[in-house]
Amino acid sequence: MRQLYSEVKTFNSLIMKVFLVICALCCFVAILKLPIEYYTFLRTIVSLGALLLIYVWTKQKNYALTVVFVIILILFNPLFPVYLHRKSIWIPLDIITGLLFLIFAFYKKSEPAKQEEKATEILPVQKTYSRDRIVSAKREIH
């Protein structure tokens, strides 16, 4: 059962990588002068990619990256489009967004290195209690 879960997780990871690379490539192609329909398609696919990453990073509690892709989602959303009217403004945004998608397509969360278990002898620890204190036999009587 564990192996099946691992295979499904790997398959989902592969699908996500492919989708994010497609998002990145679409951003890079957007630098060219293309019909308005392409840019509507671009807004849709980049918004879906941003939503996917927002979901993943919110689940991982990585809120800094979540904020970055919320901004991308706002800029590229197809429902309430942001019009920047000049291609010279969109080109750097497309390049940066494409690079971010590429970087995070191959981003791997670093796992803490497992320390080798060493055979060590565990000695029992003798507990001390306050009632075990030795009290001096000499007491001054006043």
Image: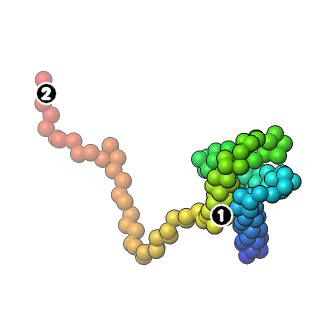
Residue picked out by circle 2: 141
Q: Amino acid at mark 1?
A: Leu
Location of residue 40 with respect to 113 vertically, above or below: above
Q: Is residue 109 visible?
A: yes
Q: Position of residue 130 (x, y in %)?
A: 32, 43
Indicate the secondary structure of the residue bearing disc 2.
loop
Q: Do tag 2 and tag 1 residues touch (Cβ < 8 Å)?
A: no
Position of residue 74 relative to residue 107, above or below, is above
Q: Position of residue 14 (x, y in %)?
A: 73, 70
- In the rendered image, the residue lying farthest to the top is 142
Q: Residue 55 — which label?
A: none
The residue depicted at 75 percent of the width and 47 percent of the height is 76
The residue shown at (67%, 49%) is 88
**Image spot of residue 2 (x, y percent):** 73, 72
Mark-to-mark CA distance, 2 and 1: 84 Å
Q: Which residue is mark 1?
A: 102
Which three-letter amino acid code belongs to the residue tagged 2?
A: Ile
